[in-house]
Amino acid sequence: MLGCVRRWFLTIIIVGITPVAAFAEDWGMGASNAKIPPSSTFQAVSTPAHEINTVAFFVISITGVIFLIVAGLLTYSIVRFRTRAGDDGREPPQVYGSNPIEFAWTTVPVLISFVLFLITARVIYVVQARPQPPDALSVRVIGHQWWWEFRYPGLGIVTANELHVPVSELASPTPTFLDLESADVAHSFWVPRLAGKTDVIPNKKNTMWIDPHVPGTYLGQCAEFCGTEHAMMLLRVVVESRADFDNWVATQKQPPRVDPAVARGRQVFQSTACVNCHAVQGTGADGRFGPDLTHLMARETIGSGVAMNTRDHLRIWVADPNVMKPGALMPAMGLDNQDLDALVDYLVTLR
Ligand code: HEC
Ligand SMILES: [Cu+2]
């Protein structure tokens, strides 16, 4: 018996450790994410998340009280009415059909459920019915297997995986409204500190909004299983002061610098299938299947948060994305080392 328990215990520990060991290489993400506060739903910094938090606490309090009452009565009964020496072994009196008791335990739960329903409905209304003010920032979010595309129609900006939005002061709110679409399968957009989850569904446009009150970086992820790399479909929302945001917009709107020193790398890029899947403004590369690379180096991470965006990581990624993100829908292009180096030299100039 004891041996069996020990074997099970060991199996659970080994099964638990194996995935951790397999993904020990974190490409600098651990250190980077350690600097960002955890993405807890209990640390809301945006109105929809605050509202959800309020309902959550309300439901937890009510159900907590119910739990304490039921568990208390149960414990009391177990202790008070346990078998004692000298019991005569007869059944206690059985009570059937007491109208007051039946009435009480039907109406009380119905009333509780009704209150919870009303509170929840109010929050759904508050969050979903907010109309989009004409001056609100509007962003199209497109879910892809396994990365996020962000398009700012009013600004002509296209980027990936890291959404930049201005901070929304309580005095002068500047909310951001998101139109969610999918290029392939169902995904779900979730940044716990900013808002609830919203499904991202093919052939359907869902909407949501955020109004982050505190500048900072907020982590999120796809919350609907969408295939092999679902767990690595991460995202960041960078909330900036108005001035920083305007700066970011200005850089994003500029065409990439043409650096003659990396002409060879640019040539490799333009003559390889890269251009079928990626866009870089001003090069004729206009692919839509992968992230827009025009301002690649303005992003902190690559591969939807799989690695920090450094020269070394880019080289590993372009040589074979599967090393970092097994199953990623970008093929290894089989470039020789010289072409690869020239190409990466070119990529790191895309600011
Ligand atoms: C068949 C289409 C396809 C081709 C060809 C392709 N890519 Fe990609 N690429 C993708 C996809 C899809 C992603 C996103 C992968 C993910 O994050 O899961 C990607 C991601 C990237 C990224 C990371 C971007 C980011 O912000 O995360 C870089 C850099 C990149 N590709 C460069 C290249 C280069 C250079 C070439 C040519 C040698 C190339 N790609 C060829 C589809 C392609
Ligand atoms: Cu997804």
Image (spheres, rainbow, N blue to C red):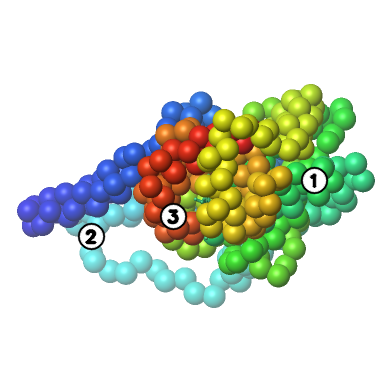
The response on whether ligand 2 sits within 8 Å of label 2 is no
**Which residue is more in the foreground, 341 or 216?**
341
Q: CA distance from mark 3 to mark 2?
A: 81 Å
| Residue 221 at x, y percent in the picture | 55, 48
Discs 2/1, front: 1
Residue type pointed to by label 1: Gly
Discs 3/2, front: 3
Q: Residues within 10 Å of mark 3 (few under 14, many from 20)?
A: some
Query: Does 200 sit left or right of 89 as displayed?
Result: right
Q: Which residue is mark 1?
A: 156
- Looking at marks 3 and 2 on the same chain, the residue that comes earlier in the sequence is marked by 2
Looking at the rendering, which quadrant does residue 289 occupy? bottom right
Q: Residues within 10 Å of mark 2 (few under 14, many from 20)?
A: few
Q: Which residue is mark 2?
A: 87
**Mark 3–mark 2 CB contact (< 8 Å):** no
The residue shown at (71%, 45%) is: 282
Mark 1: secondary structure:
loop
Residue type pointed to by label 2: Asp
Residue type pointed to by label 3: Met
Query: Does 248 sit left or right of 26 as displayed?
Result: right
